Image (cartoon, rainbow, N blue to C red):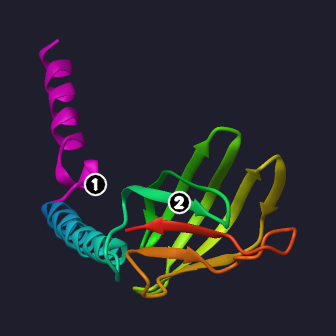
């Protein structure tokens, strides 16, 4: 019995050595070095990602005033800017006065201090007449006030109307 006990103890001692488990102090050092390099790389990549999210131009996040004007009707509403990327915003808003309504939804890319490129849909019902703009267009600060004005000003009937986003 003592002999079996000694034999089992010897086998356990040999099987638990570094060479039997495959783990050495060199492997542990290499793992620690690799982990520290990965931590440093992660920090560096995160700093690049944060820098790439910063706006080149000012931040537009939040509610802005939306105004519709033509020869006969003027009314206001709100448009909400939600930041989704560098100088890029999801926008949703509407202005309503009685039966007249203008709504917009889409994406705005701010390409300069004076220009907002809009891609989405602008729907309106003015005096019972519907009109939809569904192509890329631009809102521009024309220097006439604190607003960007839709550059596609002519409606479906050939009349000029103004849709402004105030800043």
Majority secondary structure of magenta residues: helix
Q: Which quadrant of the figure contains the N terminus?
A: top left
Above or below, 125 relative to 28: above
Comparing 53 with 154, the one in front is 154
96 to the left or right of 30: right
Q: Nearest to the eye among marks 2 and 1: give it.
A: 2
Above or below, 119 relative to 62: below
> Label 1: few (<14), some or many (≥20) within 10 Å?
few
> Label 2: few (<14), some or many (≥20) within 10 Å?
many
User: What residue is pinned by disc 2?
Assistant: 67
Q: Residue at x 67, y 60 (%)?
A: 72
Above or below, 153 relative to 9: below
Secondary structure of residue under mark 1: loop
Magenta segment = 1-24
Above or below, 49 relative to 121: below
Farthest residue in the right direction? 157
Secondary structure of residue under mark 2: strand
Q: Residue at x 20, y 33 (%)?
A: 12
Look at the image and say whether residue 15 sits in the magenta stretch: yes
User: What residue is pinned by disc 1?
Assistant: 22
5 to the left or right of 88: left
**Where does the image place residue 141, in percent across and percent down from the top left?**
47, 83
Q: Which quadrant of the figure contains the C terminus?
A: bottom left
**Where does the image place residue 103, in percent across and percent down from the top left?**
64, 51
Q: Residue at x 60, y 64 (%)?
A: 69
């Amino acid at each position: 019995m003592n002999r079996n006990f000694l034999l089992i103890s010897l086998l356990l001692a040999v099987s638990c050595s570094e060479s039997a488990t495959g783990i050495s102090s060199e492997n542990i050092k290499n793992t620690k070095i690799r982990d520290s390099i990965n931590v440093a790389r992660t920090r560096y990549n995160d700093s690049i990602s944060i820098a790439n999210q910063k706006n080149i131009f000012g931040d537009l996040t939040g509610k802005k005033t939306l105004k519709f004007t033509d020869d006969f009707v003027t009314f206001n509403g709100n448009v909400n800017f939600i930041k989704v990327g560098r100088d890029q915003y999801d926008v949703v808003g509407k202005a309503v006065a009685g039966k007249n309504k203008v709504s917009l939804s889409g994406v705005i890319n701010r390409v300069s201090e004076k220009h907002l490129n809009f891609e989405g849909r602008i729907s309106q019902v003015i005096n019972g007449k519907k009109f939809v703009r569904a192509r890329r267009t631009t809102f521009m600060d024309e220097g006439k006030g604190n607003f960007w004005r839709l550059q596609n000003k002519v409606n479906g009937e050939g009349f000029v109307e103004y849709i402004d986003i105030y800043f």
